Image (cartoon, rainbow, N blue to C red):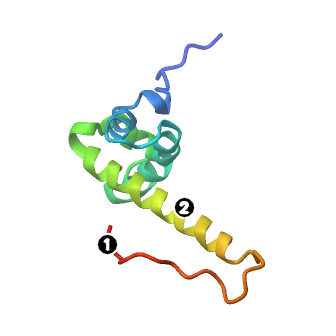
Amino acid sequence: AKAKAKVKVPAVEHSLVTFAISNGVGPSHAAASLPSFASSWAVLMEVTPREVLNSVSAEGLGTEFLQHCVASLSLQEFRESQSQKSQPDGEPGGVSGGGDGSG
């Protein structure tokens, strides 16, 4: 049996993920956001995504990762709301949103 040189850290245990979770991001969403975040930083740093995850921590990129999670979650919610709007619900004229626009 070959011994692996590097032990792969589970995404859930990465400091970026725990940082995001501690700031209110859902654990599954935080873990799912890690690969795309690593890929985007890999391009900037000119390294592989794995090297990004091995070299960065919440101290360095925690805020950036948190913003990435929020942005991707907002996009996901937007897509879901758009798909719900496209489904006919039997209401003539569509649904108008109430409220004063604050929040």
Q: Can you identify the residue that label 2 sits on? A: 76
Q: Can you identify the residue that label 1 sits on? A: 102
Total marks shown come to 2
Rendered image: mark on residue 89:
none
Instruction: Name above or below for residue 75 compared with residue 26.
Output: below
- Kindly state the secondary structure of the residue where label 1 is placed: loop
Label 1 crowd (10 A; few <14 / some 14-19 / many >=20): few
Q: Amino acid at mark 1?
A: Ser
Residue at x 30%, y 39% (from the top left corner)? 56
Towards the viewer: 30 or 51 = 30
**Residue 90 point in image, percent of width and height:** 78, 78
Q: Quadrant of residue 87?
A: bottom right
Towards the viewer: 82 or 69 = 82
Q: Quadrant of residue 17?
A: top left
**Residue 43 point in image, percent of width and height:** 39, 59
Q: Amino acid at mark 2?
A: Gln
Which of pointers 1 and 2 lies earlier in the amino acid sequence? 2
> CB under 8 Å between callouts 1 and 2?
no
**Residue 74 point in image, percent of width and height:** 46, 62
Towards the viewer: 103 or 68 = 103
Q: Quadrant of residue 1?
A: top right
Q: Nearer the viewer, mark 1 or mark 2?
A: 1
- Which image quarter is the C terminus in? bottom left
Left or right: 63, with 52 as reference point = left
